[in-house]
Image (tube, helix red, strand yellow):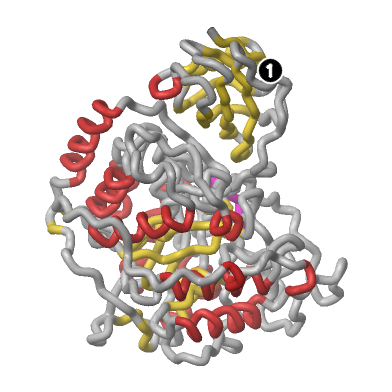
Amino acid sequence: MSGWLERWSSARRTVLRAAAAVAVAALAVTGAVAAPSATAASTLPGWLSTRGASIVTSAGTPYTIKAVAWFGMETSNCAPHGLWSLSLDEGLRAIAGMGFNTIRLPFSNECLAASSSNSINASVNADLVALSPLKLMDTVIARAKAYGLSVILDRHRPDSAAQSELWYTGAYSEKRWIDDWKMLAQRYKNEPAVIGVDLHNEPHGPACWNCGDPARDWRAAATRAGNAVLSVNPKLLIVVEGVERQNDGSSTWWGGGLRDVGAAPVTLSVKNRVVYSPHDYPATVHQQSWFTAPGYPANLEAVWDANWGYLVRKGIAPVLLGEFGTKLETDSDKKWMSTLVAYLAKTKISYAYWSFNPNSGDTGGLVADDWRTLQKAKLAALRPILTPVTVPTPKPTSSPTTSPRPSASASPKPTASASPKPSSSPSASPKPSTSPKPTTSPKPTTSPKPSSSPSTSPKPTTSPKPSPSTSPKPSATSLSATWVPQSAWGEGYVAELSLTAGAAVKSWSVSFEAPGTSAVTSAWGMSCSVAGITVTCTGSDWAAALAPGQSVRVGFQAAATTAPTAPTLRVSAS
């Protein structure tokens, strides 16, 4: 939501636990996923290719990608979410134990260029705190590999502000997009754990398929980027999503329309590399016409067949259902989920579930808000296509095999002229639909698609740069606080506070007015309460006391009808 997470828009987070508690919880997670039938494979599939409608190994054996998104590297945190609560190894062990064989890892070009990430709990992930996002990506890949997990890199957004309609923006050109992909292809050229690249998450709005307009033609852009990636590493799978509006006038989910591929496929310089990747969601994400049509849910197969399933049914090309997910709370969503899982089982289509994260606003995740308790009902719904396994403790590994790092010139700063600019009102392009855009990186709750990272995944609706608060700069006895909006959706929002101590702080609290906020559902680094329109948060756990000059990032998720944008922060410290 997509994938925003594009559907980043959804966040539920939990109070960070002390290091001792985390160590105990790590054992609990292992036990929670160790019951099932099989044992996690000790080897990865290696480089993959395509044959007809199948993804195959180098030996020609059909292979089903069973992925889950762990979003956060596309947001202003520039790190997988939840590392404020659990260790990277805990999360990967849980994912492998659920039965997945691949991580879909959303990122933004902004984070690739950043020097640091944030919201990582040093007491739980001490070795990750000082890493740049690129080095952190190295570490995620290396540890995923140790747990028998491959990785698909997902360019979820250009920056952490919101999901873009097209593959470029005024600040992030097409050249920047392609140069960054070439850099990553070079970086992991000798790492077969990185099996594929998802070129751009959820093209929508004016994006078209084979319309001939270089400013909007996603098929043409995917061909350019795919060939550029393969010129560096010809062994990668090139994952190409669809568009929202198809050439017959029909509309579907963001990135979900592949109806025109049969007549106009993506043809690359290296054969057998393209995997098409639609996204699909239930009625609680957006009310599509087919959810109220006669015969629901029996009508869904025809919808899927028409938009993307025909590629596999007719043996044209492989499909990876790149995002699907639900809170699984309504009868309609349950019918959608069971029907889709049966369809995937029958067609043997690969998939990537949205999401591992619980903080995807309109879908939730596969773990509860504590990031540890498994969502058993969802995993049971996935059981026809996903078998839990026992997970042996892997040998420690520090970094994946990476090629020499490209020079700074390999990924130039974006220039507005480097990419085609869409005209202000392209005559051939349909007007944007009225469906709302995803509000968070994971997935938009009202848009035709989630965005991740919350993407999706849901997606943040505001600029990733903190809005200055009214609290004073730190003095010898003061504490400064800055409001850092993260994501918002129809039923809630996620925000963080950036705190800096001017002197030793034994305890602190921050209060602000937030009309429409009914409850704080989870928090990390502090505990929060709501009284009327006032939210009051008090430092706790690892952020309860601060040393002179120390800066921390704490945050919370709230249930609300509207999100504050830049509230006045009243800070108290002693």
Of 436 and 548, nearer the camera is: 548
Assign a secondary structure to mark 1. Answer: strand
Is 334 situated left or right of 538 in this image? Answer: left
- Residue 155: image x %, image y %? 54, 63
Where in the figure is residue 524, as x and y percent of width and height? 45, 27
For the image shown, how many numbered marks are present on the structure? Answer: 1
Residue at position x 70%, y 53% in the image? 435
Residue topped by disc 1 = 513
Residue at 36 percent across and 83 percent down: it is 49
Side of 8 where 54 appears, left or right:
left
Residue 505 percent location from the top left of the image: 50, 14
Q: Looking at this view, is 519 or 337 the one in front?
A: 519
Q: Residue at x 51, y 79 (%)?
A: 229
Q: Circle 1: is it few (<14), some (14-19), or many (20+) Cα within 10 Å?
A: some
**Image: 539 above or below 179:** above
Q: Main secondary structure of the magenta part?
A: loop
Q: Residue at x 49, y 63 (%)?
A: 154
Residue 340 visible in the displayed image = yes
Displayed quadrant of residue 170: bottom right
Q: Is residue 309 visible?
A: no
- Please tell me whether residue 353 belongs to the stretch shown in magenta: no
Residues rendered magenta in the picture: 283-288
Q: Quadrant of residue 157?
A: bottom right
Q: Is residue 293 above or below residue 91?
A: below
Question: Where's residue 109, x and y in %?
Answer: 59, 60
Instruction: Establish if 21 lies above or below 314.
Output: above
Disc 1 residue type?
A: Glu
Which is nearer the eye, 382 or 423? 423
Nearest the camera: 521 or 161? 161
Seen in the picture, residue 501 relative to 410 is either above or below; the reply is above
